[in-house]
Image (tube, rainbow, N blue to C red):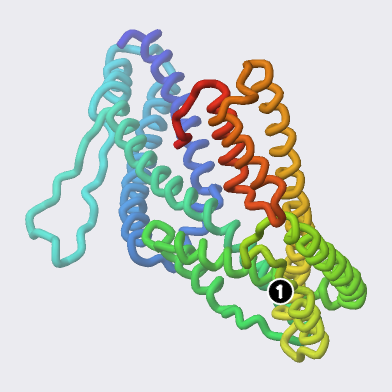
């Protein structure tokens, strides 16, 4: 090397040394690294971290040797006097040659040999590459472990928060939900000690769902207990609404059945008595508030549905009379069409008209047959003798 090249190389190596030192300091201050150093690991994580620590030991050995070479190079450069060929040769050897000595690792006694173990000599570039490979192995292990902890531990925190809330609600209600408080702690121990090997995803999903559902039920129970009197009054009013709607459905059936032929199943079936009995049972129930809350919510839904069904039934029944009247109007319009086409006296047309008219003006009217008869009359007027379907 020339003096200028040696000076340049030494400055570059000094910058490189500072950067590597900063990276190693950052590694040692990394939260996960610090947690792992004192952790009681097991399983796949213990094996992975043991391998990373071996690489880390090699990294530090290389780093110490690497820094030693640079200190020696800086000492040679700093000597007084002219930078002669001998000093340049020494700098060239330190900066470009195999100057970094990696001492042979001490092996466990069962793996030792009585023959001398050769040290390894590396250039500065080779030493940096070897350190980088070891650094990447360590950070890869940290990243994999960190990814699991970042994904799972917040969910465990949330599960434990749900569990604490459940205990508060149980105390408020004086009831037990039967949730095993040991499960979150078991999962946390498993994922802290062996994040890479602990298969906790399904158990955590199940636990989170259970705790969230239990918390929601208990919160509903507390709300229902506080609002029970008001909601009971609302249910009583809602039952009156069902009673009125079912009465209207029965009146509709009575009014329509004399006009329209209805099947037996068209007779409206009342639900109000059974729903009222359900409310009375709920009033005297001694079961836990969690179950009473579920039953109250279910009863509210049933009462609302019963009222809607009764109103729909009444509307549908009255609609049948409207359908009959619509068919009567269509038949009259088709009769006018027959007159315009000169078919008013046609025997077949007259026969079909009379058949449809008889069905429509007979009480109770068979709407299915009457609709088919009107359609037959329309087809005959238009020259279409094909039966539909």
Compared with residue 341, is residue 283 higher up or lower down, i.e. above or below? below
Near-viewer residue (380 or 44): 380
Compared with residue 144, is residue 214 higher up or lower down, i.e. above or below? below
The residue indicated by pointer 1 is: 294
At 53% from the left edge and 52% from the top edge, which residue is drawn? Answer: 151
Near-viewer residue (173 or 307): 307
- The image quadrant that residue 300 belongs to is bottom right
Judged from the image, the secondary structure of the residue bearing numbered disc 1 is: helix
- State left or right for residue 9 relative to residue 151: left
At 34% from the left edge and 37% from the top edge, which residue is drawn? Answer: 131
Q: Across the whole image, how many numbered discs are drawn on residues?
A: 1
**Where does the image place residue 234, in percent across and percent down from the top left?**
89, 69
- The image quadrant that residue 63 belongs to is top left
**Where does the image place residue 292, in percent across and percent down from the top left?**
74, 80
- State left or right for residue 182 relative to residue 126: right
Compared with residue 266, is residue 54 higher up or lower down, i.e. above or below? above
At 91% from the left edge and 70% from the top edge, which residue is drawn? Answer: 237
Compared with residue 85, is residue 249 higher up or lower down, i.e. above or below? below
**Circle 1 residues within 10 Å: few <14, some 14–19, many ≥20:** some
Near-viewer residue (144 or 325): 325
Quarter of the figure with the C terminus: top left
């Amino acid at each position: 090397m020339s003096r200028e090249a040696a000076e340049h190389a030494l400055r570059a190596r000094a910058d490189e040394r500072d950067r590597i030192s900063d990276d190693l300091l950052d590694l040692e201050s990394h939260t996960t690294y610090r947690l792992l150093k004192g952790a009681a690991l097991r399983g796949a994580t213990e094996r992975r971290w043991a391998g990373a620590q071996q690489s880390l030991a090699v990294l530090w050995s290389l780093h110490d040797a690497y820094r030693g070479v640079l200190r020696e190079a800086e000492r040679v450069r700093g000597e007084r006097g002219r930078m002669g060929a001998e000093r340049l040769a020494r700098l060239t050897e330190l900066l470009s040659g195999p100057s970094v000595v990696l001492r042979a690792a001490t092996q466990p006694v069962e793996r030792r040999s009585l023959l001398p173990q050769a040290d390894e000599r590396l250039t500065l570039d080779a030493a940096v590459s070897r350190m980088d490979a070891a650094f990447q192995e360590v950070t890869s292990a940290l990243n994999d472990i960190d990814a699991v902890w970042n994904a799972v531990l917040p969910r465990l925190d949330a599960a434990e928060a749900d569990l604490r809330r459940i205990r508060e609600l149980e105390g408020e209600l004086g009831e037990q939900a039967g949730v095993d408080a040991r499960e979150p702690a078991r999962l946390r121990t498993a994922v802290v000690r062996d994040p890479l090997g602990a298969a906790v995803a399904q158990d955590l999903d199940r636990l989170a769902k259970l705790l969230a559902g239990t918390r929601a039920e208990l919160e509903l129970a507390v709300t229902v207990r506080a609002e029970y009197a008001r909601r009971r009054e609302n249910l009583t009013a809602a039952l009156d609404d069902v009673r009125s709607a079912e009465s209207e459905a029965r009146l509709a059936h009575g009014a329509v059945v004399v006009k329209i032929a209805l099947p037996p199943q068209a007779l409206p079936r009342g639900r109000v008595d059974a729903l009222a009995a359900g409310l009375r049972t709920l009033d005297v129930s001694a079961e836990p508030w969690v179950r009473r809350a579920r039953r109250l919510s279910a009863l509210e839904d049933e009462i609302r549905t019963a009222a809607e069904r009764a109103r729909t039934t009444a509307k549908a029944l009255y609609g049948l009379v409207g359908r009959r009247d619509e068919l009567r109007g269509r038949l009259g319009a088709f009769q006018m069409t027959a007159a315009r086409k000169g078919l008013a006296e046609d025997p077949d047309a007259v026969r079909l008209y009379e058949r449809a008219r008889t069905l429509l003006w007979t009480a109770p009217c068979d709407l299915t047959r009457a609709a088919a008869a009107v359609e037959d009359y329309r087809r005959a007027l238009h020259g279409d003798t094909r039966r539909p379907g």
